Amino acid sequence: MPQDETGTKNIIAIGDIHGCILSLKALIQKLDLSEKPQLVFLGDYVDRGPNSKGVIDFLIELNDSYPCVFLKGNHEVMMQDYLIGDCIFDNWKYNGGTETLASYQENGHLSIPSSHLKFLAQCRYTYETDDYVFVHGGLKPEFSIRENLENGSNESMVWERTHLSKEAISTEHPNWEKTVICGHTPQHSPLLLKRLICIDTGCVYYSTRPGFGRLTAIELPSRKITQVENQDLP
């Protein structure tokens, strides 16, 4: 698999947004983007929150001004599968699809812009640099980075959680030759290990799960954390 190039440019990764457009805008305003760092969004832009359509509108617009990489999360996969008839609605509904469809309603009809369908189709599963691999879910800890990227399935990469097991964390992922940056599994605070960083801090759970409710970004290689509390939910 060819490696992506970032040169000496700093990277800022952003965790799971889940339809929380006001939180996303607040986080972007808080970040220092004056040097146009590489922005890497870790997926799960849709579902559960109130304005998935607004999130994708904003990301498409942001891509016109800054270098952006958009990774695909399991919620984008479910949305795409539903739209092509490969996903039972009850499954997507259980995972927040109802809120997403509501954000695309116009005059009582579902209206998804072609630009949004193109955006979903172009989201990628991984992004690799000299020092990091970015992925939504994670990679299998028993294999090397190279083995994961060459032999792993896309489905596994958006749903993976075994890298967060007590055993994997206690042994510090010895098979990985780079640091993996992921979202997907909510943390009360960003998980910052030598070879693993997880920055899903459960922004969309602000009202329902104590200890969560922040949208997180991390600047690399400095590991500087920037967060905002949820701005979308009461």
Image (cartoon, rainbow, N blue to C red):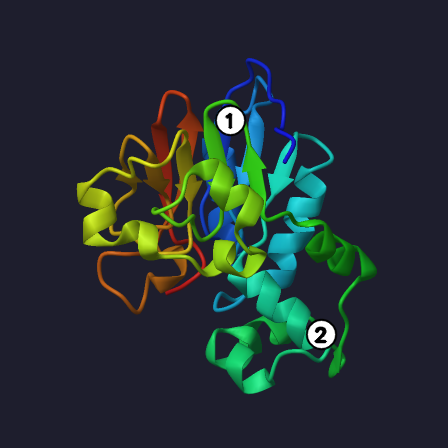
Q: Quadrant of the C terminus?
A: bottom left
- Mark 2 lies on a secondary structure that is helix
Q: Residues within 10 Å of mark 1 (few under 14, many from 20)?
A: many
Q: In the shown orientation, is residue 212 left or right of residue 92? A: left
Task: Mark yes or no: residue 51 visible.
Answer: no
Numbered badge on residue 53: none
Residue type for callout 1: Ile
Position of 175 relative to 224 (above/below) = below
Residue at (66%, 49%) from the top-left corner? 123
Q: In the shown orientation, is residue 97 left or right of residue 111? A: left
* Residue 54: percent from left, percent from top: 63, 57
* Residue 102: percent from left, percent from top: 62, 76
Q: In the shown orientation, is residue 220 left or right of residue 152? A: left
Please give the residue where the numbered disc 2 appears in the rendered image.
Answer: 83
Position of 55 relative to 233 (above/below) = above
* Residue 126: percent from left, percent from top: 56, 43
Which residue is at the front of the view, 168 or 32?
168
Please give the residue where the numbered disc 1 appears in the rendered image.
Answer: 11
Residue type for callout 2: Leu
